[in-house]
Amino acid sequence: MSCPKSLPVLFSGLPLVFLPVSSALADEDIMVSALDPIVVTATLGPKTRGESDSSVTVIDEEAIERLQPQTFDELLMGQPGIDITSNGSFGKNTSVYTRGTGSESTVFLVDGVRLRSATSGSAAWQYFPPQMVERVEIVRGSRSNLYGADAVGGVIQAFTHSAEKGREGWVQAGGGNFNTQEYVAGTAGSEGRMTYSLSASHLETDGTAIVEGGEDKGFRNTSALASVAHQFDSGGEAGVVLMRAQGNTEFEGGDTDFAIQTVGVRLDAPISDYWRSRILLAESIDEQDTRDEFGDSTFDTKTRSARWENQISIGRHEYILGGELLMDEVDSTTDFDETSRTNAAVFGQALLNFGPTDFQLSLRADDNEAFGREETGAIAMGVDMDRNHRVRVSYSTSFRAPTFNDLYFPNFGNADLQPETAGSVELGIGGNYARWFWDAAIYQTDADDLIVFVFRDGRFAPFNVNEARIRGVELSAGLELDEWTVQAGASVTDPRDRETDNRIRRRSAKQFRVDLDRDFGRVSLGTTVKGQGYRYDDAENEERLAGFVTWDLRAKWEIDSHWTTNLTVDNVLDREYATAQRFDGSAYIAAGRTAMLTIRYDL
């Protein structure tokens, strides 16, 4: 494996500077660094995966180029701690459950900007274009102490294409079965102290039937990305990043026009040799216009945010202090009792280093006009047992805020709802070596005041009633040996309703994924095997959906220095499976065998 001459250092999701890697490093040190990548989502600053004292999975640019995903959930499925359900393939409603928590309990960031629907509380995972992504960080475990409401299960952050010297431009086109077409183009470069990246993509497919005997349901998604940054003589940087995706998806009984967008304006400045300050002003939108048998409906939500972070280094210790203001707005054909709310927060974190032992202490206070104040915190300790092995232990508290639907939906919402609260404990151990790594973690999350839909006081509505306990084990490993690359992960999760002892609805207890690739010079071959165990579609655990295993194949041919072609065949054995049911008990079936051939030209 080749190693870059410099490693990117990021701060809260956006590139700042590059730290040179000393040429005096031994080959083994370089390999360990490559297999223990720098991450920023777990601690708000650049730390290696091991130093973060967290369970983290990194999907880098090389892996994304190998996998050639058409939808974002293809990158996430089977990753440790991640469980996915969908109402069919190609842009249909998708839920991402991190460590057994709800889809509303995973924060999704795009270049540091939170993307979600304020009405449903969940991100529109099915609409986010993977063609715009060069890196994904998956942080498992509570992060409300850093990101506030909803980070009960974890945080997933996508980093869009960044500008790099030497990259000039590219064009890609492809086609596959189900009349699927894909077009991607982009350019990136630098002029003096300014760097820029521009790209666009279009994916269109006739889709497949999502219920037995149904008609094909199509999907169309057009996306664009623009990023510009300027570096100052002082070492500071200012930048703007804009990402937008819009299109249409069909479902049984109707269709939806959608648009998701993030805009981030950042200013990073060194105050002194030991103090760096950063301001991020951002806006995200989630818009959906739906036509179905019940009529036409519009749910447009907007989140504006201002975040200020200060990174202070004192000796071997590092401190982060900051504040955040979030403002949610709803514009809908549904007459909500309230259409806006504001959340203000202050937070702090101490990263203390005492040789082989690190401590992480963090505390955050949120003040929300809808449900009042919530304080969360976390403490973690990591110990280097030797040069290659590290043990970590942590405890954290978190909360999930009620959504606009929970609180204000006409004749349904409950304005007296309180946030769900949870406490989580985790023990992990990992090993990093010259050419491979492994990591194992066990955890337990105990949640109170779960928001569930029950019949009470003469109406069906959300109430704070249940308690839940989620226990789990996660394993991951990776190997890079000569021309072989292997990534593997597995999870066992037991999400239980403490009142009934039933498994929480739609949660699978087992997931696994293995990615194997071999480089033969200009040709490379790869395969992925992934699977999920059975799940129940109802809270009573009576409607069981069978587990499944799928097998994918891929091949890449670098024709010359400019031309590259890729072939992917997903679900080679044409396995039929479902992860969710409709209200009438019929299953939402996934697509069968899917093939895609693309060709790319790099300038």
Image: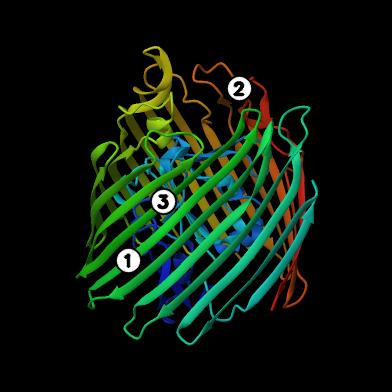
Q: Image quarter for residue 413?
A: top left
Name the residue: 43% across, 72% down: 239
Cα distance between the residues tagged 3 and 1: 17 Å
Mark 3 or mark 1: which comes first in sequence? 1
User: Is residue 411 shown above or below 392?
Assistant: above
In front: 437, or 276? 276
In front: 594, or 78? 594
> Which corner quadrant holds the C terminus?
bottom right
Badge count: 3
Image location of residue 273, percent across then percent down: 23, 78
Residue wearing tag 3:
303
Cα distance between the residues tagged 1 and 2: 46 Å
Are the residues at dot 1 and dot 2 in contact (C-beta closer than 8 Å)?
A: no
Instruction: Give the mark toward the camera: 3 or 1.
Output: 3
Are the residues at dot 2 and dot 3 in contact (C-beta closer than 8 Å)?
A: no
Q: Image quarter for residue 144?
A: top left
Residue wearing tag 2:
583
Q: Secondary structure at mark 2?
A: loop
> Which corner quadrant holds the N terminus?
bottom right
Cα distance between the residues tagged 2 and 3: 31 Å
Q: Secondary structure at mark 3?
A: strand
Residue wearing tag 1:
279
Q: Amino acid at mark 2?
A: Phe
Name the residue: 62% across, 79% down: 168
Q: Amino acid at mark 3?
A: Thr
